[in-house]
Structures are given as C-alpha cells and as structure tokens.
Image (cartoon, rainbow, N blue to C red):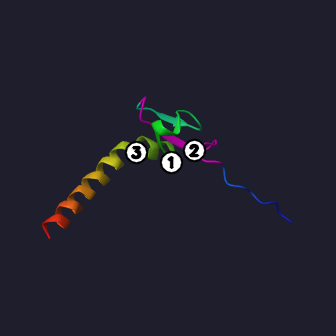
C-alpha cells in the first residue's frame, strides 16, 4: 500500500512568493505573510503578481462603474 502524501504547508518549500516590502520574488518561506503575495507555483507567476493584481483591480473598478451606472 502507498502512503498518504500530505500537502506542503502554506509556508513550506517549493512555493514562490512576491514580497511587497522588498519588491522581490522569494522561494520558500521568507517575508512575513503580511508582506507578501502568493504562493505561486513558479517564479514567473510570482514575478507577474503585481501586474496581475493591477489588471484585476482595473477590471473590478470598471465592473463597479458599469454596475453603478446601471
């Protein structure tokens, strides 16, 4: 019988983060949770975190404007 494999903890190895404080990508546990975004599955995703957040915020702002104009 195979053994159960537990998921890695949120702050565990194998995960990428974007530090809001240093503006740098981090691998594994690094900055405190309040100072980072993630986890991301790979470095490229972590590097794109701020751009993705900006795009989502713009989209949500536009949806709010459309809702309020209805």
Label 2 with label 1: CB-CB less than 8 Å: yes
| Dot placed on the residue nearer the N-terminal end, 3 or 1 | 1
Looking at this view, name the residue that lies furthest to the right.
1
Q: Is residue 2 left or right of residue 34?
A: right
Give the label on residue 40, or none: 1
Residue at screen point 20% across, 67% down: 67
Q: Secondary structure at mark 2?
A: loop
In this rendering, the count of numbered labels is 3
Q: Secondary structure at mark 1?
A: strand
Asked if the magenta segment contains residue 16, the reply would be yes
Viewer-closest of 20 and 69:
69
| Dot placed on the residue nearer the N-terminal end, 2 or 1 | 2
Q: Residue 50 at what x, y percent from top left? A: 36, 43
Distance between mark 2 and mark 3 Cα atoms:
14 Å
Distance between mark 3 and mark 1 Cα atoms:
9 Å
- Residue beneath disc 2: 15
Residue at screen point 40% across, 32% down: 23
Circle 1 residues within 10 Å: few <14, some 14–19, many ≥20: some
Circle 3 residues within 10 Å: few <14, some 14–19, many ≥20: some
Q: Residue 46 at what x, y percent from top left? A: 46, 43
Q: Tell me the magenta residue range.
A: 9-22
Q: Residue 26 at what x, y percent from top left? A: 52, 35
| Above-or-below relation of 66 to 53 | below
- Residue beneath disc 3: 49
Magenta stretch: dominant secondary structure: loop
Looking at this view, name the residue that lies furthest to the top.
22
| Above-or-below relation of 65 to 49 | below
């Amino acid at each position: 019988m195979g053994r159960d494999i537990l998921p890695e903890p949120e702050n565990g190895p194998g995960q990428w983060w974007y530090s809001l404080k240093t503006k740098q990508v981090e691998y594994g546990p690094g900055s405190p949770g309040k100072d980072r975004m993630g986890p991301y599955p790979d470095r490229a995703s972590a590097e794109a975190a701020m751009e993705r957040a900006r795009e989502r915020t713009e989209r949500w702002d536009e949806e709010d404007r459309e809702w309020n104009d209805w």
